[in-house]
Image: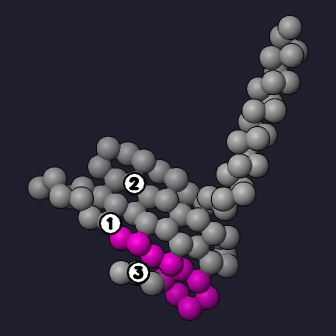
Amino acid sequence: MRVLNVILLAVVLFLGVVAAAAKNVVLKLDKNTMSHEQFGEPGKAVHGRYAYEDAQGTWHTVNYKADHTGFHVLK
């Protein structure tokens, strides 16, 4: 029974890795006062957004892309 549980856990972890790779998730971070998501292929081109809460409680979000031409903030 214990071997079956280990095999099942391995399959679940493998499927999670495959699902993340399919979306090309590079980074996903979510904290109380900030978050950051990035997708793409590191070293080639990525896009994403980060958000943070300032001292007054206002949230600010920045969308960006980064590729061979550099880092660009998107509107």
Residue where numbered disc 1 is placed? 61
**Residue 17 in picture, x, y percent from top left:** 73, 46
**Residue 37 in picture, x, y percent from top left:** 49, 59
Would residue 17 appear left or right of 72 to someone viewing this image? right
Q: Residue at x 61, y 88 (%)?
A: 68
Render colour scheme: one colour
Check the picture and name the quadrant holding the C terminus. Answer: bottom left
> For the residue carrying disc 3, how many other residues have a C-alpha within 10 Å: few (<14), some (14-19), or many (20+)?
few
Check the picture and name the quadrant holding the N terminus. Answer: top right
The earlier-in-sequence mark between 2 and 1 is 2
Which secondary structure lies at badge 1? Answer: strand
Which secondary structure lies at badge 3? Answer: strand
Q: Main secondary structure of the magenta part?
A: strand
In this view, the residue farthest toward the bottom is 69
Distance from the alpha carbon under mark 3 to that under mark 1: 11 Å
Q: Amino acid at mark 1?
A: Thr
**Residue 55 in picture, x, y percent from top left:** 15, 55
Q: Residue at x 59, y 83 (%)?
A: 67
Residue where numbered disc 3 is placed? 74
Q: Nearer the viewer, mark 2 or mark 3?
A: 3
Residue where numbered disc 2 is placed? 35
Q: Which residues are magenta?
A: 62-71
Quadrant of the image occupied by residue 41: bottom right
Q: Is 27 drawn above or below residue 11 in the view shown?
A: below
**Residue 12 in picture, x, y percent from top left:** 75, 33
Q: Amino acid at mark 3?
A: Leu
Distance from the alpha carbon under mark 2 to that under mark 1: 9 Å
